[in-house]
Image (cartoon, rainbow, N blue to C red):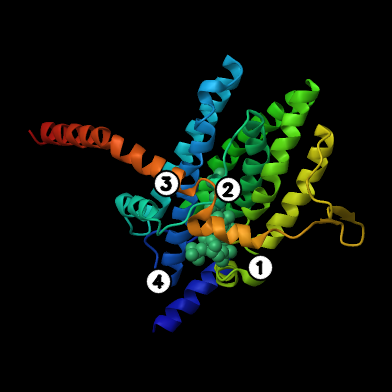
């Protein structure tokens, strides 16, 4: 009978129907969605840290306001995504415990340090640019709450990408030192940005099933290629060099060819041995513990309001 249900379920997906929280779904569909959506939520929240480091050092009031707004947006994305994951029958507390214990992953990119102001530009341009490429595809994902969360997230990510690109445009039109700072930043962030799309399709254990379920509308390699194709002309406008000697337009394929990612480095970072993994996790745990009084106060207030209503 389960087999029959599974066939009916797959037929709904093939028919491009959205799956909603109370619908029947295979246990594996539920689990893999909790895995991916929570990893995505954790990435948004941990992703606030590298940029948070620069709020007090933004070079002008205008830059500071834009950076603050962007970082707050990331926190908001985390909240929509945790809510979407909760519709699959897991609590926020469990999800956060999984992050803090190291059981749940978050994007490798946030384990690299943001060491100059130019990094604020590059993170917006490349990291948010890569995130949009992935998330626009996810708007068409089969699980309703995930797909709907993506619509607003993508709008906000476009603003993030533009504010980053504009920081770099300003630096690239500035002094030779400023332009050199921008180039150094791209040299450090280019390859980690390509790693955001995950392992090659041939080495990606989840892709095949996720494509069948339309959790993934495009594969890791397809999205990575689309990102490279979109980004190279933007680097040319900035007058910056992408640190890949193998990068070359391929007239036959109508795509850029590019060099091989250092997969050893990728897996090291994913497994917790990147430059900032320990610091990021301990900063998150610390912030959570320090925020306990806020959660206690919110609960006490909610209880008080509920008691009032009863009377
Ligand atoms: N960083 C950390 N872990 C990664 C990364 C990465 N860049 N890429 C892949 N992995 C992990 C996967 O989570 C998976 O681990 P698990 O099976 O133990 O959970 C393993 O490596 C194998 O990879 P895949 O089989 O390719 O995994 P998956 O099908 O989940 O694809 C991808 C990975 C593309 C990241 C997918 O999960 C996805 O699209 N997620 C939603 C987007 C997202 O999380 N973005 C976060 C960064 S953007 C931002 O926050 C601004």
Q: Earlier in the sequence, mark 2 or mark 3?
A: 2
* Disc 3 from disc 1: Cα separation: 28 Å
Seen at 74% across and 56% down, the residue is 225
Q: CA distance from mark 4 to mark 3?
A: 30 Å
Q: Quadrant of the N terminus?
A: bottom left
Query: Is the residue indicated by label 2 positioned so its CB lies within 8 Å of ligand 1?
Result: yes
Q: Are marks 4 and 1 in contact (CB under 8 Å)?
A: no
Q: Secondary structure at mark 4?
A: helix
For the question of whether residue 34 can be seen, the reply is yes
The numbered disc on residue 201 is 1
Determine crowd level at label 3: few under 14, some 14-19, many 20+ residues with C-alpha closer than 10 A.
some
Whether the residues at callouts 4 and 2 have beta carbons within 8 Å, the answer is: no
Residue position marked by numbered label 3 in the rendering:
281
Determine whether 66 is above or below 31 in the image: above
Q: Pointer 2: what residue?
A: 109
Q: Residue 69 location in percent, x, y? A: 52, 27
Q: Nearer the viewer, residue 48 or 139?
A: 48
Residue 34: name its quadrant: bottom left
Closer-to-camera residue (33/94): 94
Q: Is mark 3 within 8 Å of ligand 1?
A: no
Read off the residue under disc 4.
Answer: 27
Nearer the observer: mark 4 or 3; the answer is: 3
Foreground label between 3 and 1: 3
Q: Counting residues from the N terminus, which is met first, the one under dot 3 or under dot 1?
A: 1
Q: Nearer the viewer, residue 60 or 80?
A: 60
Q: Residues within 10 Å of mark 4 (few under 14, many from 20)?
A: few
Q: Nearer the viewer, residue 241 or 81?
A: 241
Q: Secondary structure at mark 2?
A: helix
Q: State left or right for residue 1 relative to residue 143.
A: left
């Amino acid at each position: 009978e389960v087999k029959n249900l599974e066939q009916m379920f797959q037929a709904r997906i093939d028919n491009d129907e959205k799956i909603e929280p109370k619908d029947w779904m295979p246990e594996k569909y539920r689990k893999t969605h909790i895995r991916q959506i929570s990893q995505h939520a954790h990435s948004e929240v941990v992703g606030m840290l590298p940029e948070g480091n620069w709020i007090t050092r933004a070079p002008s009031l205008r830059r500071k306001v834009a950076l603050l707004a962007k970082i707050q947006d990331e926190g908001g994305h985390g909240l929509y995504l945790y809510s979407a994951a909760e519709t699959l029958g897991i609590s926020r507390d469990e999800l956060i415990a999984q992050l803090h214990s190291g059981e749940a992953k978050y994007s490798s990119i946030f384990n690299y340090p943001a060491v100059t102001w130019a990094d604020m530009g590059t993170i917006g341009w490349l990291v948010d640019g890569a995130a949009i490429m992935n998330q626009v595809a996810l708007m068409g994902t089969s699980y309703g709450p995930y797909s709907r969360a993506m619509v607003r997230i993508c709008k906000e990510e476009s603003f993030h990408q533009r504010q980053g690109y504009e920081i770099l445009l300003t630096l690239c039109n500035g002094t030779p030192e400023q332009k050199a700072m921008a180039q150094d930043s791209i040299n450090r962030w280019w390859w980690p940005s390509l790693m955001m799309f995950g392992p090659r399709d041939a080495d990606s254990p989840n892709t095949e099933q996720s494509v069948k379920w339309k959790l993934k509308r495009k594969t890791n390699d397809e999205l990575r290629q689309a990102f490279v194709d979109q980004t190279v002309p933007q680097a040319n406008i900035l007058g910056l060099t992408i640190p890949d000697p193998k990068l070359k337009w391929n007239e036959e394929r109508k795509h850029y060819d590019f060099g091989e990612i250092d997969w050893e480095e990728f897996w090291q970072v994913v497994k917790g041995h990147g430059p900032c993994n320990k610091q990021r996790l301990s900063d998150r745990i610390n912030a959570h513990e320090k925020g306990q009084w806020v959660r206690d106060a919110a609960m006490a207030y909610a209880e008080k309001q509920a008691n009032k209503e009863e009377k």
